[in-house]
Image (spheres, rainbow, N blue to C red):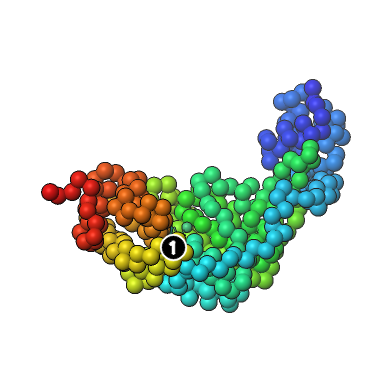
């Protein structure tokens, strides 16, 4: 039993791929008990030449898909303005000026930013775009991220299959900045971005369309590692990125935590937005973070306090009004030993607090 044209096509496609020749169909007939003439008649819409069929892009298929493409996409979100909002709490530090210069140059120049978690990599890219009034499309990369998430795919809408642009295509066409956030969490599936990182645009074979990059399109990637993996267990889930892939990034910036003077400014700005008036607390938190980081770099502890976490603590303080409690709830996520070490350290840098159950 041969079945419908669609069934035969998908069966052939799954066995032999998109491009099928007469010999494949003969083999298929032998296995499935069909007649060569009958089968080829049935799949004539996929014929692209003498003894050649293509299940991806037959002219009639391209036509129907092009029509589908004109239909509304799943989320019309991209009609909107994608320029990020400026944030008053942002303080310029680290590679920010260089990154901004790259984006301002409007050249295609893929940029890699590496640095420990929570030190403002994502925020920096966002604020650079906000200041330059550039559109930004951010994709949070995970191990699950694949071509469908990045490039796009078909979605079923009201019973119709409709092509939906992925964020990468959207960024290409708009000439936006594409932020591949936490790229070292990716699997090899992101290799589908290779042509894009070469600045070439991409052929969407599923709809037979070529998308070339609009002026201004650029790619920024952030990562905790340099894409070489990590063997000290600190970056669980990070993967080794393909060497050829990394080679497509001409520049890499190493972003450190902000210097204490800068971090102090950040915390004070955040404190102001939270209505926290205790400026001294901001300074002590920064000192504390600085000591912890130094100890961490010296190998004295396994965990680190990020700028993000200092802000979490400040927020907790605006809620609870109690320093030690605020630090406590924000360091509870660490193991007991680390947590205790962190609390004791804070007790040492701030004379105004008393460690609960502390020394008699
Ligand atoms: N330069 C900065 N100015 C003000 N706040 C900052 C700055 N850098 C980081 N932060 C704060 O730290 C948080 C974490 O930064 P984020 O960019 O998410 O870190 P990363 O992407 O490096 O993990 C931000 O949401 C922001 O509150
Ligand atoms: Mg980030």
Relative to the observer, which residue lies in front, 296 or 271?
271
Q: Quadrant of the N terminus?
A: top right
Q: In the visual, does 67 lie left or right of 266?
A: right
Binning the other alpha carbons within 10 Å of mark 1 as few (below 14), some (14 to 19) or many (20 upward) gives few
Residue that appears at 64% across and 63% down: 82
Relative to the observer, which residue lies in front, 109 or 93?
93
Tell me residue 330's x, y (percent): 36, 50
On the question of residue 251 being in view, the answer is: no
* Disc 1 target residue: 275
Relative to the observer, which residue lies in front, 104 or 42?
104
Q: In the visual, does 254 lie left or right of 213?
A: left
On the question of residue 285 being in view, the answer is: yes
Residue that appears at 78% across and 39% down: 158
Q: Is residue 186 above or below residue 17?
A: below
The image quarter containing residue 44 is: top right
Tell me residue 265's x, y (percent): 39, 71
């Amino acid at each position: 039993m041969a079945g419908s044209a669609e069934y035969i096509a998908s069966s052939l496609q799954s066995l032999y791929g998109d491009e099928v020749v007469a010999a494949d169909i003969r083999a298929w007939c032998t296995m499935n008990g069909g007649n060569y003439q009958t089968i080829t008649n049935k799949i004539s819409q996929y014929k692209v030449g003498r003894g050649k069929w293509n299940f991806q892009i037959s002219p009639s298929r391209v036509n129907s898909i092009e029509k589908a493409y004109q239909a509304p996409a799943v989320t019309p979100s991209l009609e909107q303005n994608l320029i990020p909002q400026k944030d008053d709490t942002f303080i310029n530090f680290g590679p920010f000026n260089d990154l901004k210069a790259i984006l301002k140059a409007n050249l295609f120049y893929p940029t890699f930013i590496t640095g420990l978690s929570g030190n403002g990599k994502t925020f920096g890219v966002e604020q650079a775009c906000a200041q330059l009034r550039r559109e930004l499309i951010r994709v949070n990369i995970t191990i699950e991220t694949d071509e469908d998430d990045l490039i796009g795919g078909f979605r079923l809408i009201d019973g119709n299959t409709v092509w939906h642009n992925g964020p990468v295509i959207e960024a290409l066409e708009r000439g936006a900045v594409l932020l591949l956030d936490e790229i070292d969490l990716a699997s090899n599936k992101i290799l589908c971005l290779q042509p894009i990182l070469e600045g070439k645009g991409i052929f969407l074979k599923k709809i037979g369309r070529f998308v070339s990059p609009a002026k201004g399109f650029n790619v920024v990637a952030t990562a905790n590692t340099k894409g070489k993996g990590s063997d000290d267990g600190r970056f669980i889930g990070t993967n080794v990125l393909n060497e050829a892939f990394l080679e497509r990034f001409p520049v890499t910036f190493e972003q450190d935590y902000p210097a204490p003077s800068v971090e102090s400014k950040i915390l004070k700005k955040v404190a102001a937005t939270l209505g926290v008036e205790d400026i001294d607390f901001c300074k002590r938190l920064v000192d504390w973070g600085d000591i912890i980081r130094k100890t961490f770099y010296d190998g004295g502890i396994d965990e680190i306090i990020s700028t993000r976490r200092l802000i979490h603590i400040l927020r907790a303080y605006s809620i609870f009004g109690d320093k030690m409690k605020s630090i406590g709830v924000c360091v509870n996520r660490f193991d007991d030993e680390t947590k205790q070490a962190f609390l004791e350290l804070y007790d040492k840098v701030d004379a105004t607090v008393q460690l609960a159950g502390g020394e008699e």
